[in-house]
Image (spheres, rainbow, N blue to C red):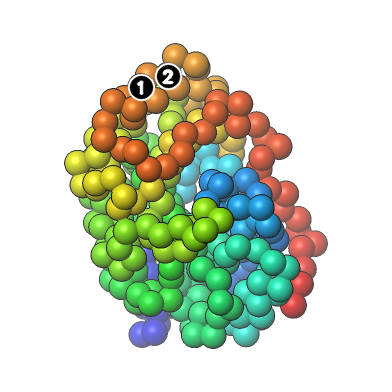
Amino acid sequence: MLENESCKLCPRRCGVNRIKGERGACRMGYYPVVARAAAHFWEEPCISGINGSGTIFFSGCSMGCVYCQNYEISTLDKGKEISIDELRKLFFSLYEQGVHNINLVNPTHFTGVIAEALRERPPIPVVYNCGGYESVETLMSLEGLVDVYMPDLKYSNDELGERYSHVGNYFETAKAAILEMYRQTGKYELDEEGILQRGVLVRHLILPNSFENSAGVIKWIASKFRPGEILFSLMGQYIPYGAAYKYPEINRKLSQEEYDRVETLLFSLDIEDGFVQDLDSAQEEYIPPFSEEWQPEL
């Protein structure tokens, strides 16, 4: 953790002193850097609903996905540094806009200050929206503060995790994290409007030329969770973004055949709860705008 001035928030455990301005893999200091905070309507229906999800996009990242659709902020570090008190005020500002939840996007490397800000929170669910590369110890520090965990499960093939996200041992790390998330929340709960109030929603983005990777993810979900326990979202929105052009095998959108093959496998297994995203979602217009002039509405 960061309290002893040696950062071990993410599985990389860099050990740098971010309080004194040292930078580890995430490239961020101690205080949160926010690139956008607004009602967001492009999440799963149980997250966005009618009024939108109150998303707070944090800059920097403990991973390094070459195809990241938030590349401008995860790698180029756009955003504005704010205090813990300002972050707390931001929660309430979004709540007053009528959003369904507070959606913390890419929060891993700011978990310590987020936990402190959440000691006072608005009466709507808090969503922890992450890449799946999480430390169980850090997640345990959030127990009672997070209502909904929304992790990616990007890879069952660790070679792809190393090639495309520059992390080792991704699958074992993410599996342990998801099991801890489920331990905290238990079975998912929806309100009368179909908005997720508590639980785990696991996302998987299909990559080009990577059927076996997706198959490993889906088979693990089917083996560990029974119907009614978690939600699973299969995403077809991949576009070659960021530095994906450097990797010829993923420098294109999914083909219909690739998408159909993964979808067929999903439907053949006992995964009943969740969402399947259409291929026509693979459009840059769905990427949120990030502005260097962004100012929080406090």
Specify the farthest residue to the top: 257
Residue closest to the eye, 34 or 270: 270
Q: Seen from this angle, which residue lies furthest front?
A: 192
Give the crowd class for mark 1: few <14, some 14-19, many >=20 residues within 10 Å: few
Please, what is the three-letter code of the amino acid marked with disc 2?
Answer: Asp
Q: Is residue 292 above or below residue 282?
A: below
**Secondary structure state at the residue bearing disc 1:** helix
Asked if residue 150 can be seen in this view, the reply is yes
Identify the residue shown where x is 66% and y is 52%.
50
Do we see residue 12 in this rendering? no
Q: Amino acid at mark 1?
A: Thr
Residue 206 sits in quarter: top left
Identify the residue at image location x=65%, y=63%. 99
User: What x and y, as percent, mark residue 265?
Assistant: 31, 25
Instruction: Identify residue for label 1.
Output: 264
Q: Nearer the viewer, residue 182 or 20?
A: 182
Identity of the residue drawn at 34% across and 65% down: 185
Residue 260 tag number: 2
Q: Answer with the quarter of the image where residue 285 lies.
A: top right
Write down the quadrant of residue 183 in the picture: bottom left
In-image side of 296 versus 1 (left or right): right
* Distance from Cα at disc 1 to Cα at disc 2: 6 Å
Secondary structure beneath disc 2?
Answer: helix
Q: Are marks 1 and 2 in contact (CB under 8 Å)?
A: yes
